[in-house]
Amino acid sequence: MSKRKDLDKNQIITLLHSALSEEVLELNKVQELLEQVLEEELWRKRIIPETEEVATFDSFFDFVHTSPPVGLEHRFSNQDEVADCSVV
């Protein structure tokens, strides 16, 4: 069952990107958004509203390292943790 209420997957990913890059949300909100993106596999496939492009990823690692609006373009402090992530 989806935890989503009024937010669509693009809004959730945009909020997560903003939270990671600008540190505008509380840490627990980042965790909630990240859990939702992972649990519902929102990172795997979505339509980018700005371009109507269909973005697909085979790995979470690629999604994290791809530039917005398609991905998160975030560099974690320990790259090995992301590379070894069991979500592929």
Image (spheres, grey):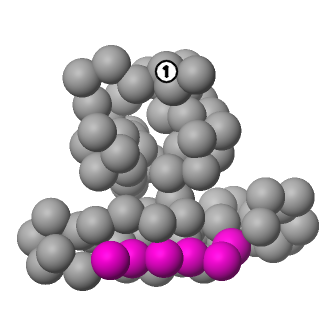
Residue 57 appears anywhere in the view? yes
* Residue 35 placement (x, y as % from top left): 62, 34
Give the residue displayed 28% in from the left and 67% down from the top.
47
Query: As drawn, which residue projects farthest toward the front?
Result: 1
Count of labels in the image: 1
* Residue 43 placement (x, y as % from top left): 52, 59
Q: Which residue position holds label 1?
A: 3
Mark 1 packing: few (<14 Cα in 10 Å), some, or many (20+)? few
Residue 58 falls inside the magenta stretch: yes
Q: State left or right for residue 88 relative to residue 14.
A: right
Instruction: Give whichever of 9, 61 is nearer the camera.
Output: 9
* Residue 15 placement (x, y as % from top left): 32, 41
Magenta-tinted stretch: 54-59
Seen in the picture, residue 29 relative to 8 is either above or below; the reply is: above
Q: Quadrant of residue 39?
A: top right
Seen in the picture, residue 79 relative to 22 is either above or below; the reply is: below
Q: Which corner quadrant holds the C terminus?
A: bottom right
Residue 39 falls inside the magenta stretch: no
Query: As drawn, which residue projects farthest toward the left?
Result: 50
Q: Amino acid type of disc 1?
A: Lys
For the residue labelled by badge 1, is the local secondary structure a helix, a strand or a loop? loop
Q: State left or right for residue 53 relative to residue 2.
A: left
Give the residue displayed 24% in from the left and 23% down from the top.
6
* Residue 80 placement (x, y as % from top left): 85, 70
Q: State left or right for residue 86 relative to residue 65.
A: right
Q: Quadrant of residue 54?
A: bottom left
